[in-house]
Image (cartoon, grey):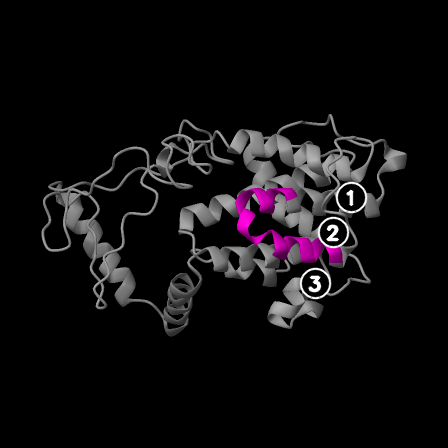
Amino acid sequence: MHPARIISAAVCLLTLSSNGEGWAGTSADRLHGSGSERRGSLVLEWNEVTLEAIRRASLGPPIVARALAVVHTCMYDAWAAYDPVARGTQLGASLRRPRHDQKRSDQRQAISVAAYRALVDLFPMQQRLFDDLMAGLGYDPLDTTLDPTTPTGVGNLACAAVLALRHADGSNQLGDINGGPAYSDYTGYVPINTPTQITDPNRWQPVTFADGRTPAFVAPHWGLVEPFAPPADRSLRPEPPAFYPDERYMQQAEDLLGISAGLTDREKMISEYLGKMRVSFGSNGFEWLPRSRF
């Protein structure tokens, strides 16, 4: 299966295939008081804990998107080991259990172990949050076995393979590229424009807010990060916009203004909701994940 199809289908497949009953209360239940809404899917439980970790970490949108993709890829690869057809993104079918050993309970355990390892790697300062969910689900977070005949081993192996790739994907998660903080820029980017002067209309301009803050460009090195699904050659990317002083530059701006002016009340409310979500949550719209049923 093409990688793009694997990743784009991962959340849906996991959500639909991980239904169960008899869920124990989790840290997410205590945090939000809505555990019953999420007990229909193991993946939604891990989504909620992931989102809580993101809220506490205050990461920028591209880093949030990567974190969610890492967690879900790890869960998908563990899930795939208990499916007769699916292949993991890193280890292919090498972890696939024999048909007689493809038990739902083992699959759920492998998924949880993979999610746990990914989250501890991404948010090490919040391990207690993930430990609580593992305890609530009845799994041992201290079990680091790599035995592929066990569900814990499958989860550990699947996640380790994904993390090995992602630690070298250009995101600088570990800060090892430049010896700086996690996800820090290593390109030496400096904005050409200032909040009060535009030197190049085709380049980004910082904005100073009413409270005096002037946020920096978030992750200017992100164009160098290995993508999860689209091919690296950008063959699926749309054509870039017209650049100044091309005559189409003004036309595309006017087109956008026309679209904005023609929004219906419903579209305006959706836009306002997503805008407030980005401000309060900082994840560019991922708040919907724990509530979606696909």
Residue for badge 2: 18
- Check residue 134 for magenta coloring: yes
What amino acid does circle 1 point to? Answer: Gln
Compared to 147, does 28 lie above or below? Answer: below
Magenta region, main secondary structure: helix
- The quarter of the picture where the N terminus appears is top right
What amino acid does circle 2 point to? Answer: Ser
- Neighbour tally class for label 2: few under 14, some 14-19, many 20 plus, Cα within 10 Å: some
Mark 2 or 1: the one toward you: 1
Residue for badge 1: 107
Mark 3 or 2: the one toward you: 3
Q: Secondary structure at mark 1?
A: helix
Q: Residue at x 27, y 50 (%)?
A: 216
- Neighbour tally class for label 1: few under 14, some 14-19, many 20 plus, Cα within 10 Å: many
Compared to 60, does 259 lie above or below? Answer: below
Residue for badge 3: 26
State the CA–CA distance, disc 2 to disc 1.
8 Å
- Nearer the N terminus, badge 3 or badge 2? 2
Question: Which residue is farthest right?
Answer: 100
Q: Secondary structure at mark 3?
A: loop
The range drawn in magenta is 117-135
Q: Secondary structure at mark 2?
A: loop
Front residue of 157 and 225: 157
Q: Is residue 9 visible?
A: no
State the CA–CA distance, disc 3 to disc 2.
17 Å
